[in-house]
């Protein structure tokens, strides 16, 4: 039934400066195909998020081959010419090795829109020297994405150390009271570090969009030391 | 016992670009006096948040008179020469008349640091024409603070309409499932508008700090209408 | 053991104007068979809801073939002659492509009882122009079913725009704080749009029944475009 | 500061068929006065909900005297000529004597718009004969508001007995697991009676608005005993 | 490691009048074998609860054959000579066909200890005539077990109609707010029917034990009409 | 408005063997007076529960003097000739001195209906010798009410030691995770002692009613004028 | 009624090495008097916790004068000769000025039993240099009590820096998601710092008792006759 | 991508006295291999926790053979020479056979660091004689780990009987309100036994680390039967 079709928000890019990503979780094969058909017909590329490896495998080969897939972040880039990358003005800091999938979703989203990001991983506060040794790399960045599960102390500590916008991404790792990321979410929201902002649990994509809003709202290349970058 | 004294984070300003506000809820009269004494001794002004009218009244007159108090926002400004104000590069949009106390806390915090903000009130989505009529005023602003209680649909709608950073402040108004602001908080966090960021319930101060981080991180003249600004 | 058998509420139709649907989740194959046997013996058709494809497949072929199955809505229609359809006096509006399964359950339930419904999909508030462009199609309908997950802002916005009964169906899509639909449910319940009513999460069947109650309680030809109808 | 003023949704009546009520909880005296001033200036009456006796008492006499106040429901009617009442096409059934304040808010709201309602009180299911003796009075009504706290079994039982739209209003009475009405809310939402719809806890006003939407959407003379009515 | 062995509470029978059942969920095959070995060595029979069909299948045949298994209730009776059955003094009433597994656990537990129970199924309150037609069968029973999921209105209604001890067993059926049985549990606990008592969600075994405590505490065959029974 | 009047469940006594108590929390003075008027007119006594000292004081003297009030349990007995007391067949065991108000509500309720109860207080499990020294006093009782807040370990331990029906009453004492009694409630519901039953938090009245149901359903001479009792 | 009297756990000291404190919240004046009478009669001193200033004021003067009261911690010491203090082997570190009341309860409890404690206050992680500057004072202590509200990152950071037992005390300060201390509690429990242990929200007394258990279990001569102590 | 690599906290041992364990849940095969490579390269052994049997099976044989795996506790010891064991100064007491997996994680962690522990299993409070018979074995131990699910009454009872540090480990067994261990957690946190400390649900590893902190912080020979030990 045609009624169930996807109606893309085609004017989003002109309103917001970036177009609509496709949240693929729970989408059926036919839905994905129709969305990809529509994008090709209108000459648009697509960022696909939460695309399971099984969903990818279920697509016909002609569709599958249009997608540059990353299994860690479960993101796919479809028919999209990645733009040249800016010098990094966004830092991404993560607390532990369980946070990498969420961090990777943010990095892939930023890359899709041509934003490099300076990454520092596995610097959770249980061994705080790891963070303190590298905080000077973070300090000049106007935007910082802080990814952490469990007790999510990392965003609080970071937001007390650096002046840029700090966007906390709680992660659904852990077990017991930590599980599903609610302890991390609530810790980030109740942080006493002033001005820490938060997105939904595991929402690496949302944090990247917030970072994009920031760097774009304030215009062209900024950030005191942004001279180089690293690929994703 | 001196051990219970306040130890101000005196280096916060150099690290973050703004100094520590004093969260006054639950503080006893003597604590407030000691904090005000210490600030005067070190030549610092103070922003006091969540200062109840009864707490103010309990202070000796000499202290009370040093405070410029606003009962709506429950904020006090102590021994502080408000800086001249920039042209606004921050918009503050609120949904209903119950949100004004929280909105006022944000406005007063921004004012303390010399940031004007363009305010639009009472434009909740139950009468969405009110918001649509004024969205063009919001569109050029690089930072938007959206204050809303109950179902908090306003931040979602706004973040779908304007390109700047949108910071949602859930408000603890309402009753039943809405009370204490958790419905608003969860609605904002699960918004499908990309890149919406969120602070704790009723945290007008935190939203203002996040806005400050943004405008300061990106430095001088920014935003279509901003005429002047200040560095960090 | 006969004690565990289904005891259909055979007088429901005379009391309520529509008979009992069979909620199939967790029912075992034998239970389903006995229910279908009983219905055939008493000359009744059946609406089967939450019937998994695996449950269908586990039925003997003779049973399976009596069921008109729709995998999207997981509904089955058994031994039932669908009545001719009225002109639509119910609108169904959904926010995103993840809401289609729940929307389809409502549509199939209404169809079972001969009610057409005017469908508008994928008009979530993150791109509010999509809804505003089509709101005039909804306005004349006396009953509107609004299906939305995540922050469920759609029902609030709709109930502020149209005068009919608006029935919100929260959907269990999303992740983090949105998952399981509680954020959507609470947002709908705490909406500031007056008179919005709500059913359980994912309860497309319940929303359809409420719509049926409305159109039947108020009797014959109603709504600007309704050409025919049936009494209760 | 004029920014904090109330901006009434003046077009609500033309869109929805009834104008905006004023939710007074937490509003300060000056806010209430400004709202009443604005209403008088524009020649509108007002329905005031959740108006505490202390709030009323704090108003200057000239304002206080314009309000017809009911302490049980905490509602006030300001400068409003109550319309003549229709024959009742709405029933209101409540479970216990603790539910009367919420029930009264619904009754007063309906009265404001000229809708009578047939009331049956104190018929909770712990003594189910009380309900069964009177169910025939409810059966012909196209709309039924069912008000109940604690375990809220009344709406479920009612919705299994009568064919009209049944709107459950959970009430925040009780203690322990019942307190604040969440047990009642969840019981109503998970009722197995088909088509029961629910509003927020204690939301008598919302239930009345939903009932108004129903009777107005379906237009004039309806319901077996309704003798007269009014359009929307 | 012998340390992980089961230490049966062998004196429970003398203290409580019935011995310890074995809660099998999560137990590994070896644990089950050791428990069955120990029981045989000490000449005791065993009631096994929450024994999955897959757990049964994983046992060596010699063990499997000692167990009288019921897949609906997931109970097994091992090496136990079922005592002759008393006339029923316990009624078990259930609301819907989804409640049968939990009801069956209670029935099997009672049967293990020689207690018959008078069963009435599928009499949920959405069609309350079903319950009212049969309430006279329940009235003479000194103990009533009421099994219900979703909104669990059945135990409330029953406890208002009959004078015996009514033990509510909430069931984890349903979805949305009902899922996992918490709505049912809270409804039962906050019932306004006086003296209703409650056990954990899905705890058919616990309800049966409570019934056993009652009938045994008060001595030998009682109950006004207990003359006949039905087997399980 | 007469509609808001109390409609007593006058047939409750014949159905259940005890009449309806009046839950006074939130009732206004006039409501209480009308209820007392009605009781006098129909020649009935009344048990008043959750009657605040301030509510009592607000009653006119003529009413106040009809009430035998106990401030600890907040219960009042109105126009009731307490029946002679039976020998105790119910034990009441409480864990700490914070549990006495709830325990007293149970004791007063039992006394109203002529049931004595054997009381043992302040025997919480943190000093388990206190319970063990007195367990033989509890063992012969067919019904045991166990009142405990915080972690509510007492009912579990008791139900493992004595064969009678054990009714746990969780108490809303404590702070942090214990506050409002949910930790106690959940601990009691998930007890591994078989057959423990539970009532709502602080529901001493409900536990007493359950005990009454038990002793009356089984014991010979029961009803309001029980003159003697029996052992187990 | 004597039944409601306090039964002190008089053998607690011989079992645990410290006697029972009196948790005074919700205790009535007479209860407190009886407890103090009993203590004097048996020659014991008393530690009173959660004793409100109003409760103290309500006591007759003869009782009041026996109590050394501290309003910050709401503790009272009654008829107790404080033992000479050991060199400190316990550190107490707190995050903010809102945590002092809870910290003071711990300090007063330790002092009651002759344990000094090394205190460091107002070193929350939003300005982490404050903690890092003083961590060497904490490192040699075998036991560390870490008191923190809001996001409670302090205990995590501390437990990653020092080798002793770290006991986290979550504090119920803050608002929104932080309120009542659950965010702090869950953060502490899900900390990735290994071996952090936690007590209930605001339970300064409990943390002190845990510290006492530690220093007494290990340090030489401990138990009721502790005469001296040891350094770190 | 190298960025996602594990950055071991190599200085943890010098800070805390024990090195970092590897929490394997959710880690992919390549991550585990890199961690094992790094450990071999730096000459360190590894304790692997939450290592699923399927994760182990997915490792190449060369890796798998370096791991001493225990399926009950899901722990692996890699390239580690277990130190000689001390005489036990830690007791581990568990309530039921469902708690053994969590208990085993604690025992394996202690063994890794050379700490013996005295184990007592299956002594839950439903048959409290089992615990009382063995309490004298626990009394002399300075540290006690108490593992219990469901209502977790065991830690409370134990902490009232023995003077050492008692560390409660709530276990996620059970169903209904007990499931996921939150009832057990909250019961342990709200215990009225003074000084009980708690770790996260199922966190046997954390309890062992806390015990290690205790025995090491207090240094050499301690506990009545400890023959040898090691300093920190």
Image (cartoon, coloured by chain):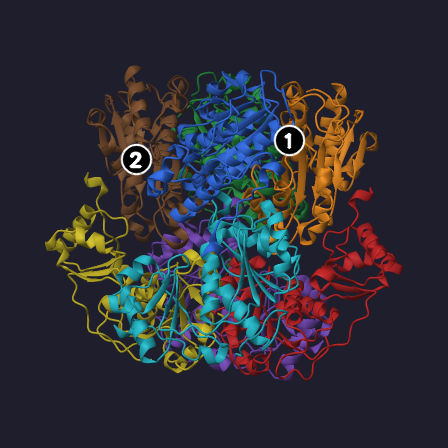
Chain colours: A red, B cyan, C orange, D blue, E green, F brown, G yellow, H purple
Residue reaching furthest to the left = G62
Marks 2 and 1, how far apart at CA? 43 Å
Up the image or down, C145 lies above or below B231; here it is above
Up the image or down, F171 lies above or below D103; here it is below
Toward which corner of the image does residue G73 lie, by quadrant? bottom left
A151 vs H200, nearest the viewer: A151
Q: Left or right? Give the position of C210 relative to F105.
A: right
Report which residue position mark 2 lands on: F105
Up the image or down, G30 lies above or below D158; here it is below
Up the image or down, C197 lies above or below H220; here it is above
Q: Position of residue D18 (x, y in %)?
A: 57, 35
Dot 1: element: helix
F167 vs A53, nearest the viewer: A53
Q: Position of residue A122 (x, y in %)?
A: 60, 74
**Number of the label disc, if any, that sits on residue C210:** 1
Q: Left or right? Give the position of D166 relative to G168.
A: right
Q: Quadrant of the N terminus of chain C?
A: top right
Q: Left or right? Give the position of H170 relative to E125.
A: left
Q: Chain of mark 2?
A: F
Dot 2: element: helix
B124 vs B192, nearest the viewer: B124
Q: Position of residue B193 (x, y in %)?
A: 65, 57
Local crowd at mark 1 within 10 Å, few (<14), some, or many (≥20)? many
Residue reaching furthest to the right = A62
Q: Is residue F220 visible?
A: yes
Q: Quadrant of the C terminus of chain C?
A: top right
Local crowd at mark 2 within 10 Å, few (<14), some, or many (≥20)? many
């Amino acid at each position: 039934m045609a009624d169930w079709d996807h109606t893309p928000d085609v004017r989003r890019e002109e309103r917001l400066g970036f177009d609509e990503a496709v949240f693929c979780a729970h989408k059926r094969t036919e839905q994905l195909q129709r969305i990809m058909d529509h994008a090709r017909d209108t000459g648009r590329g697509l960022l696909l998020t939460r695309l399971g490896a099984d969903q990818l495998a279920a697509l016909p080969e002609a569709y599958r081959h249009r997608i540059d897939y990353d299994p860690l972040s479960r993101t796919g880039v479809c028919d999209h010419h990645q733009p040249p990358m800016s010098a990094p003005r966004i830092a991404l800091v993560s607390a532990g090795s369980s946070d990498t999938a969420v961090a990777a979703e943010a990095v892939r989203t930023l890359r899709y829109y041509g934003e490099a990001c300076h990454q520092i991983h596995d610097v959770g506060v249980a061994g705080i020297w790891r963070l303190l040794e590298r905080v000077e790399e973070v300090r000049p960045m106007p935007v910082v994405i802080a990814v952490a599960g469990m007790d999510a102390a990392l965003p609080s500590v970071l937001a007390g150390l650096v002046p840029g916008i700090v966007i906390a991404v709680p992660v659904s790792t852990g077990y017991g009271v930590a599980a599903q990321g609610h302890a991390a979410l609530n810790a980030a929201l109740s942080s006493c570090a002033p001005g820490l902002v938060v997105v939904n649990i595991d929402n690496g994509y949302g944090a990247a969009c917030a970072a994009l809003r920031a760097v774009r709202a304030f215009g062209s290349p900024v950030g005191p030391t942004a001279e180089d970058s690293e690929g994703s």
